[in-house]
Image (tube, rainbow, N blue to C red):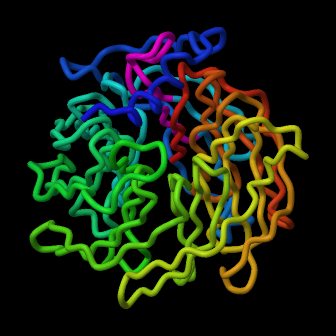
Amino acid sequence: MKGDGWSRRRFVGLLARTATATATLPAVAACGSTGGARAPSATPTAPRASSGASGRERGSSGPRPLLLGTYTSAEGGGKGIGLAAYEPGTGRITGRGLLAEVDDPSYLAVHPDGRTLYAVDEREDGAVTAVRLSDRRVLGSRSTGGAAPCHLSVHPGGRWLFSANYGSGSIAVHPIDASGAPGERTHLVTHSTPPPGPGQRGPHAHQVVTAPDGAHVLAVDLGTDTVYTYRLDEGAGTLAEVARARTRAGAGPRHLTFHPGGRHAYLANELDDTVTVCAYDPGSGRLTVGEPQSTGAGPDQGAGTNYPAQILVTADGAYAFLANRGHDRLTRYAVEAEGARLRLLGTVPVGGDFPRQIAFSPDGGLLFAANQHSGTVSAFRVSADDGGLHPAGEPFASPVAVCALPL
């Protein structure tokens, strides 16, 4: 089902500004017939000890890989999954060419063992594709059974791959074999109830993520204003619904992230421009949605229409960050009361247009923002003292940048 929501979602890619988005990455040699190339020159190295805001060790002796998602079907879009390298100390990004040719790889995730990359193919006939990072070999693609998959994640145990079909409002489960390749779907769950929210014609699954307890999988649906909780059967790869959490009508929930304590989560609501703190019960998987609060992008901040995109929490649970599309700023919150409260601290310019996705470097010392309309990736140093964000070099040109995944 293509539907109104899928059209609304796609137009921002098709109308992306191309002045900076058309910058090409350096050419690399092809490897076989899979569309891959030589192994990345940005080789992961052991970090140096230095505590950051995330509570993880900070620093590295050399450049590390940065994987880039795009819309290949958009004007000025990329040719597949881009490859760059970043300096952990400075945040400076340099191009390294193309990792693999994949259609519309708009969201990326890495297997827990670090060997395999997974990408959604956000097409009408949706699919997920696996790429082995050591030699850039495409291991295979599998149908998600739905339209326009926009998010995917790997279960912490490494055996199951989940994807969210935005266009058809469904969640797919695929097994992962020993090579890292996805197998045929073991389950497809469609969000048939409750009825769509105001202005929506159907469900629009936007995210699927495993809770910290490992037993529950949560699916965020923008179309039905609902977060669904499923219990995962780790033997069969099937999902059984155990709870639903409703936001207020028309909120349009988009992205959920958990506090490391496992008892609270934070929900970015795309359509009503709010965030909410949610209580979470690991035993039942039940999520309780709190009162909506400001994104810091109100009229008093000089903002027009704003669409919150993604929210993240530092590994030590001290700070949260929200990407705002339209306002084009990153909001910083202090996390208080053991995760039960967010306190707005302020916003900083993202240095680009329409930040669709944000991600921490593995050590937590850097935050990257993929700016769709400007076709750039911005990097920020994250202060270990107060969670402040400080620009790290000039934004890096990447065609229709919709996902940046630092390794």
Residue at image coords 41%, 82%: 286
- Going 38% across and 41% down the picture, which residue do you hit? 150
Q: Residue at x 49, y 32 (%)?
A: 68
Name the quadrant containing residue 230: bottom left
Query: Start and end of the magenta stretch?
Result: 64-83
Q: Is residue 179 left or right of residue 363?
A: left
Is residue 130 part of the magenta span, yes or no? no
Which residue is more in the foreground, 320 or 135? Answer: 320
- Identified at 65% across, 13% down, the residue is 20
Let me know if residue 361 appears in the view.
Answer: no
Q: Residue furthest bottom?
A: 283
The answer to which of 198 and 312 lies nearer the viewer is 198
Q: Is residue 68 magenta?
A: yes
Where is 53 relative to 197, above or below?
A: below
On screen, residue 219 above or below 92: below
Residue 146 at what x, y percent from top left?
A: 21, 41
Query: Residue 311 sits in which quadrant?
Result: bottom right
Q: Is residue 74 left or right of residue 61?
A: left
**Residue 262 at x, y = what percent?**
51, 81
**Which quadrant, please, contains the N terminus?**
top left
Q: Can the viewer see residue 258 in this picture?
A: yes
Work out whether 122 lies above or below 405: above
Residue 66 on image: x %, y %:
53, 37
Q: Position of residue 201 (x, y in %)?
A: 36, 42
